[in-house]
Amino acid sequence: MEHRIQVKMFGRFEILVDGKPTDALLSKTRKGQALLQYLLLHRNEAVPNYKLYEALWPNEESSNPENALKTLVSRLRAVLVSCSEELGKCIITKRGSYRWNNDLGIEVDLFEYERLCKELKGVTVLGPDELKGFNQVLEMYTGNLLSGIEHEEWIISRSIYLHNEYLRLVYQFIDLLKEAQDFDEVIRVCRVALDVDAFDERLHLELMDALVKTKRNNEALLQYKHVTNIHFRYLGIQPPEGIREFYKQIIRAGQALDMDIDSISKELKEYDMTGTAFICEYAVFKEIYNLQIRNIERTGAIVFLALIMITSMDYQPMDPLKLDDIMRDLLEVLKQSLRKGDIVTHFSASQYAMLLPCAQYDNGKMVMERIKRAFYKISTNSSVMFSYRIDMIKELDKMGNQTNG
């Protein structure tokens, strides 16, 4: 009786026989798994023994590499036969080489994926067959090729290529769905693809745009906050400029009011009824900063730009989750210590930037010292260092102009 054998190469490597995993048996031979994976990646060629030895035993020398490889193949075959008789025939021996047996009818997700990539390339109409094909790609590509060992030298270039192909197909699918005005489906596709590539800028933008188009502005805003958070937490940086700029589009979409001055006045008045500093996203902070520069040029007002940075005493990178907690506590201190006219933004994973309308530098420095004392009062971690810089916007602008010139 023939068994259904499936090999999964996207995400974690897995071989299923009649739906049952063979991990317990295959885990006994790690080198054997690598041999199998190498032959699968080169399924249309007989791989010379020396190439296999170089790939599987990099930087190792042996007095008899041929014998080491022969022993490995023999052990691997024994394990595969214990999984299934058919599986035991998957390696063909040729003079001085080995190859994958393509005639056994074993289902390999990589082979099916590559077939779909060819079929869907250049598709311009989204019919039932094309729709099925794109959805198969989404279902099949659950992670990078051979996740966990994708940084092996013989896997890297293939893994990158297949990942790029995945993104190309997803973008193509999204474009076709947008032409069909099927924005609910765009949302689903983006969310599935973001599980695979959480930092892809275009996927985040397409998702937020589709949410806005389907009048789900609150969800778009939550998505913006999510992408900002993961960039801070895992990369320690602001999200790309395209994403930051999209924030303003989300806000505009959610503020479509009647052209009635009373309702507009009421909306503006109720926008922030708290007595604390105004906490805003970086895109908004940037706009306010530029407005302040214009205001300074026109009225001569004095506004200071301040920057607070949290670092470890030894200047080593901090644990992201620990840094998140510290920055959250610091934000509470800022809310309690600053006035209503002050403006705060989370500038980077470890920094807050502030605009402080003050009469003179000493006043601004006094505010910063007050924040510093309040922070150290609540901070239970003695290895954390609070540092800050403060300067007048007008002077900073002059310095910027001199540098640009």
Image (cartoon, grey):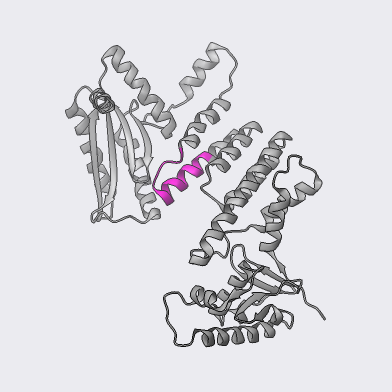
Residue in the foreground of this view, choosing between 323 and 48: 48
Q: Is residue 361 left or right of residue 98?
A: left
Residue at 20% x, 38% y is 369
Residue at 36% x, 23% y is 290
Residue 214 in the image: x percent, y percent?
Answer: 66, 33
Q: Is residue 370 left or right of residue 110?
A: left
Is 231 colored magenta in this rendering? Answer: yes
Residue 315 in the image: x percent, y percent?
Answer: 26, 54
Q: Is residue 400 left or right of residue 219?
A: left
Residue at 62% x, 65% y is 9
Task: Please determine whether, in this image, residue 249 is positioned above or below residue 319.
Answer: above
Residue 402 in the image: x percent, y percent?
Answer: 24, 25
Residue that lies at the very extreme toward the right in this rendered image: 1
Task: Specify start and end residues of the magenta stretch as a single range.
Answer: 224-240
Residue at 51% x, 18% y is 266
Q: Quadrant of the C terminus?
A: top left
Residue in the foreground of this view, choosing between 50 and 155: 50
Residue that lies at the very extreme toward the front in this rendered image: 95
Q: Quadrant of residue 188?
A: top right
Task: Please determine whether, in this image, residue 358 is positioned above or below residue 134.
Answer: above
